[in-house]
Amino acid sequence: MEKLFGLFGHPVQHSMSPMMHNDAFAQLGINASYRLFNVEPKFLKDAVSGIRGLNIAGCNVTIPHKVSVMDYLDEIDEEAKTIGAVNTIVNDDGKLIGYNTDGRGYFESLLSVLSRPLEQHKVLVIGAGGAARAIVTVLAKEKAEEIVIANRTVEKAEELANVIEGVKATSIKNAEQTLDAFDIVINTTSVGMSPNIEEIPLSLEKLRQDSVVSDLIYNPINTRLLQEAAQKGANTLNGVGMFVNQGALSFEYWTGQKPNRERMAQLVYEKLGGKSC
Ligand code: NAP
């Protein structure tokens, strides 16, 4: 019988996850399909009960449910607990287990552009929302040499820094002035996302040309931040890798099989109308 997987979110209609997962199921000969479920917040509890009731094999969870869904699960993986959010649910014979693949998915894409271990990198994370939390948790666990969070609302950066050992907080202005101290700069804000493609989250005046600049945004593929960083000679990383890797890691939790990540990325680039890089 066909297994059913899906994405719970609100809204969800523009998600590229069905395309990516359904292709991977077909490639691996798995009899399964992945659907979108537009779940209003007031019905989240019912929707999660529906996973058990309808024997849905697994789900992804996206905005705005990543935190609230935790209340309705039977078990939560340690890393997801530390992050404080779940983006993947596995239905293990009626027991619902929550995971978070965002931070690890990001970390794996970052590794592809680093020429030395993360331990030897000072990291500046711009933004202090959900994505920043997942990324900072994993980069701290993987022992980045230093992590500083800069955010428009400094209090939120401080709140996040306070719960992860060794992490510091600062203002965007201060981050701009000390930019040459960092080896990796990661934008986790939505600044620069379509349609506001001319926006940039901070000035790159003091960027070192041997640094890595990464943007979680993948629409557009090449944000203004990445364009300016490349002009300064920095190595750049867009958000497609994170998107593909978090999906691939969910897929592995559900099926125990490894999907072809290059093929997944190719599909995403085709959909976004850009070239893989
Ligand atoms: P979130 O929890 O809402 O956090 C948003 C962050 O952006 C906050 O730090 C916020 O600062 C900052 N921000 C928003 N508008 C701003 C502005 N005009 N100027 C300065 N700062 C601004 O969102 P999230 O879930 O972390 O997602 C953030 C971004 O990551 C989105 O663009 C999302 O698409 C992307 N993302 C990508 C992937 C991927 O797979 N590639 C995965 C997850 C997320 P304040 O605290 O001051 O409001």
Image (cartoon, grey):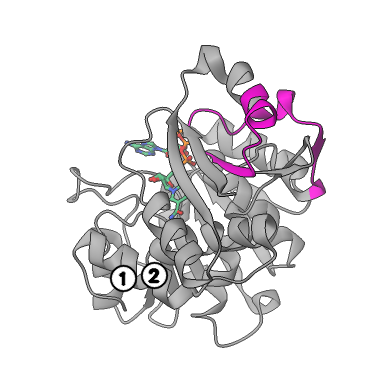
Is residue 140 placed above or below 56 in the rendered structure?
A: below
Callout 1: SS: helix
Q: According to the image, label 1 marks what residue? A: 229
Horizontal side, residue 99 vs residue 265: left or right: right
Q: Position of residue 35 (x, y in %)?
A: 44, 41
Q: According to the image, label 2 marks what residue? A: 265
Graded by Cα atoms within 10 Å as few (under 14), some (14 to 19) or many (20 or more), the crowding at tag 2 reads some
**Residue 152, can we see it?**
no
C-alpha separation, residue under disc 2 versus residue under disc 1: 23 Å
State the residue in front, 237 or 161.
237
Q: Residue at x 76, y 61 (%)?
A: 141
Q: Residue at x 46, y 71 (%)?
A: 27
Mark positioned earlier in the residue sequence (2 or 1): 1
Is residue 189 placed above or below 139 in the rendered structure?
A: above
Q: Amino acid at mark 1?
A: Ala
Which image quadrant: the C terminus? bottom left
Q: Position of residue 1 (x, y in %)?
A: 60, 49
Q: What segment is highlighted magenta in the picture?
A: 49-78
Q: Position of residue 36 (x, y in %)?
A: 42, 38
**Residue 196, can we see it?**
yes
Does the stretch in magenta take in 82? no
> Which corner quadrant of the image does residue 187 belong to?
bottom left
Q: Residue at x 54, y 81 (%)?
A: 114
State the residue in front, 230 or 277.
277
Is residue 125 placed above or below 50 in the rendered structure?
A: below
Does the stretch in magenta take in 55? yes
Disc 1 under 8 Å from ligand 1? The reply is no
Q: Amino acid at mark 2?
A: Ala
Of badges 2 and 1, the one in the foreground is 2
Residue ranking furthest to the bottom:
115
